[in-house]
Amino acid sequence: MISLKTQHKPIRYPMIALVSLALGLASCDQRTTSQYEATATVTYTWQVEYSIDSDKTNQIRREKFASTSLINKNGERPGEAVTGPDDRGLWYPALPPRPTVDEIEARQKPQEQISQPELLKDADYTITYESEGQTINASTNYDVYRTVVKALPNQRPLELTLGVDDKFVQKADIK
């Protein structure tokens, strides 16, 4: 009996993986569009970690302080850009003001140690496209953003692979 269970496990797991893959692919939709634009919202945020024991990650509390954001459209330099483009072709705003020691200590709880303020750099990507007479805004990733930037100068049509519920564009191919 034990050897039967052992023999079936290798067969059962690949079947589960294949069924999951088939369901995932079946839920993806594709659209072709000639009207599109991409935005990347880049953000700088100051963060400080507070901890009682820095060796235990579950005892670290993170507090965010000032932040600044800038919207990049279609890979072009925004007028308010201060630095860039970086290695990903993104432009960035001025740095937010670094938190003061008074601001940092005001959020400190008894027994907590304070880390040095850390500047976080983040980017969120969105694509806006026309489909069946409607304008759709969907989240996406860096690769789709760059594909749109490359396709725009020649207004080449794009084939978009959409995720579940069409709220995320997983892939874009230039036609």
Image: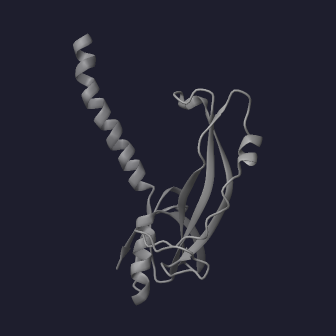
Q: Which residue lies furthest to the bottom in this view?
A: 154
159 relative position to 13: left or right: right
How far across and how far down the image is residue 45, in percent? 62, 56
Q: Identify the residue shown where x is 40% and y is 68%.
A: 87
Residue 22 in view of the camera: yes
Image quarter of residue 52: top right
How far across and how far down the image is residue 80, in percent? 62, 78
52 relative position to 130: left or right: right
Q: How many marks?
A: 0
Quadrant location of the N terminus in the rendered image: top left
Q: Identify the residue shown where x is 63% and y is 45%.
A: 48
How far across and how far down the image is residue 81, in percent? 57, 76
Q: Considering only vertical position in the picture, is 121 above or below 133?
A: above
Query: Colour scheme of this structure image?
Result: one colour
Q: Identify the residue shown where x is 74% and y is 28%.
A: 110
Quadrant location of the C terminus in the rendered image: bottom left
Q: Considering only vertical position in the picture, is 49 above or below 23?
A: above
Residue 171 in view of the camera: no
131 relative position to 107: left or right: left
Q: Considering only vertical position in the picture, is 141 above or below 62?
A: below
Image quarter of residue 151: bottom left
Asked whether 9 or 171 is in front, the reply is 171
Q: Residue furthest front?
A: 101
Asked whether 131 or 168 is in front, the reply is 168
How far across and how far down the image is residue 160, in percent? 43, 70
Asked whether 166 or 56 is in front, the reply is 56
